[in-house]
Amino acid sequence: MDTMGAMHRLKLFIPGPTEVAQEVLEAMARPPIGHRTPEAKELILTVSGQVREMLRTRQTVLLSTSSATGLMEAAIRNLVRRKVLCTSCGAFGKRWYEIALANGKEAELVHFPEGKPVDPEVIDRKLAQGGFEAVTFVHNETSTGVISPLEAMAEVVRHHPDVLLLVDAVTSMGAVPIAFDELGLDVCLASVQKALALPPGFAICVVSDRALERAAKVDARGYYFDFLEMARRAAEGQTPITPSLPHLFGLRVQLQRILTEGMEARYQRHLRMARLVQDWARQRLALFGEESSLSPTVTAVDTMGRFPPRELIQYARQHGFLVASGYGPLKDRTFRIAHMGELQEADLKELLQCLESFLSSRS
Amino acid sequence: MDTMGAMHRLKLFIPGPTEVAQEVLEAMARPPIGHRTPEAKELILTVSGQVREMLRTRQTVLLSTSSATGLMEAAIRNLVRRKVLCTSCGAFGKRWYEIALANGKEAELVHFPEGKPVDPEVIDRKLAQGGFEAVTFVHNETSTGVISPLEAMAEVVRHHPDVLLLVDAVTSMGAVPIAFDELGLDVCLASVQKALALPPGFAICVVSDRALERAAKVDARGYYFDFLEMARRAAEGQTPITPSLPHLFGLRVQLQRILTEGMEARYQRHLRMARLVQDWARQRLALFGEESSLSPTVTAVDTMGRFPPRELIQYARQHGFLVASGYGPLKDRTFRIAHMGELQEADLKELLQCLESFLSSRS
């Protein structure tokens, strides 16, 4: 394998941004159109319909010119008057807790150890204490490579009829099945630069009718992320503010590509890519996450103290691959390989061959 | 002039989105890079430096994945604890007032009649009553085609040392001189799809050191638009969340194009385009805005009740040009022509020739 010069673009195996299809990049380079024209309306309605099909819902799709973090904050400001329960098994679970506090809400954090998933039974008992208007849940924890049980969580929250279930699906949407209506979710959000494989700068979410009813009773929802205004405009094929047209152009093409691949085929492809990486990691080093909860989209590899992760990352970079460091306190112990979006098994095999030479060079 | 089919793209003479240079569109189609890499850091620092040069400031540049409305809300949440004075001479002046209320702040609105500019002397007397932490000001009111006197306003606000001056420069930045440091502004924000001539989906602002000091004393600033966190990361060449890389790629190219044209040359070009349109409107119909305050970037034309504006707009559309309807209550009386960004005098002449044939066809 040749060492690639710094001028060559690195192939992305980080958990976002991910690789983007050339066809999508070209669609994004289309000159802008008037955002209040019939053409823009058709664009917005088409993209919303595609999102509905992907997430199996008939409820409201909101298209947001922001990252997913903006929509996490939106969900808190729009749907929580007083108090929210935040579940967590890593950095992104904690983020929702920090967001609630930064918005002057009461929040309680139930944190599970890094590497383990959220346990719905524990949450069930916590909710039974009462007083919570909503519960936040990260479907796939990107920082540890762990997926938490969405179906079981939805089942549990349904036993508490006044509690809304807010789901961060940032690194699962488009790669892992999510049946929004069937599960009775209230918010399901993601940014587009992960398994949806667009460049960053946009986020989407589905909001349930009962969440919108709740929002109508909440004061000081803010302006930019006001769910009621966003929903009102969405029904007209509009957004309250001028949206990122390049991302809408790109989404229309990319969501069509996703639906053409077929959701089931796409889920299976992600599982196959995940197994490739997991098998390699198990054999050569170790997996950081608990075996029963390994993520289909990102794997955190435990280096077992055999080398500093940054040396492997640097080696991969010199060979044209960008893999991710461990997140926060896991930086010195893990590195992460994303296997989502446009990537194929062949791409992962190529990467693993490179990492294999790194390991050989050290033995 | 041939009638263009619906399949042809309309040339944009609306006050955003505006025409974008092909070179900029191509830069935006670059595949994504890792947003925590040295390459991304260099990109962010370069763009920030270009904004500083354009706005003649040494203070903090914030790059926001949102429309300008998001940054308007950010300015309110970060810089106003209790009460803000909102000045207005049209729809966008009022927007800042609505944003303040939607965020649970006290706000007082001083509204000048549509067509007239904000009068700094009136604001001076209002501020003298005390109790205001900040004053909001729309430099160029897009809904009426009127520019308000920024220099005089800055002079007035300086007499009230505890009051911050928050400037919406959405349709003036890059087209009208703004010397941020010299004027002692505290916030100056814009989205990129107006005179800066990028596709929509991104916004930029400059924040003064004293505004950042003020923010440190404000609770519940929120998360996505927290100025302190944005400023802390900006100093490192980062953004707190994954930014819209396509817009950053585009901005680097476009801001270089703007600086290469030369700010003074650019200001003069906008004045020449404005005069072309104003002269035509004065001669054939009437100007909506007060003569002394006509906007260099957008002209509202008063149809004098001679025809419904939508007929002219429809005619222009059939000939390949998109002009804007009047805003809100001015819809039945005015239409608007934007003359900003990439447009040249020749483009305006072409448009006016088309509008001229419309008028002839009716006489």
Image: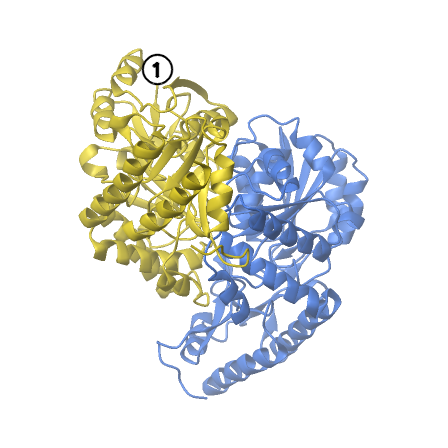
Chain colours: A blue, B yellow
Residue A139 can be seen, yes or no: yes
Who is closer to the viewer here, B196 or A329? B196
Residue A133 can be seen, yes or no: no
Quick check: A320 above or below B239? below
Q: Identify the residue position indicated by label 1 in the image.
A: B131
Quarter of image, res B155: top left
Quarter of image, res B281: top left
**Image check: B7 left or right of A58?**
left
Q: Chain of mark 1?
A: B
Q: Residue furthest top?
A: B129
Task: Indicate the position of residue A358 as horizontal and vertical percent values.
Answer: 48, 82
Quick check: A195 above or below A22? above
Task: Indicate the position of residue B42 as horizontal and vertical percent values.
Answer: 32, 61
Task: Indicate the position of residue B191 as horizontal and vertical percent values.
Answer: 39, 44
Q: Secondary structure at mark 1?
A: loop
Quick check: B173 above or below B93? below
Quick check: B107 above or below A190? above
Query: Residue drawn at (31%, 38%), measured in percent from left and top?
Result: B280
10 Å neighbourhood of mark 1: few (<14), some, or many (≥20)? Answer: some
Q: Residue furthest front?
A: B363
**Image check: A332 left or right of A61?**
left
Who is closer to the viewer here, A82 or A203? A203
Give, as a three-letter code, the residue at label 1: Gly
Number of numbered labels in the structure image: 1
Quarter of image, res B126: top left
**Image check: A347 left or right of A260?**
left
Query: Residue drawn at (39%, 64%), measured in percent from left and top?
Result: B27
Task: Indicate the position of residue A256 as horizontal and vertical percent values.
Answer: 65, 63
Who is closer to the viewer here, B249 or B170? B170
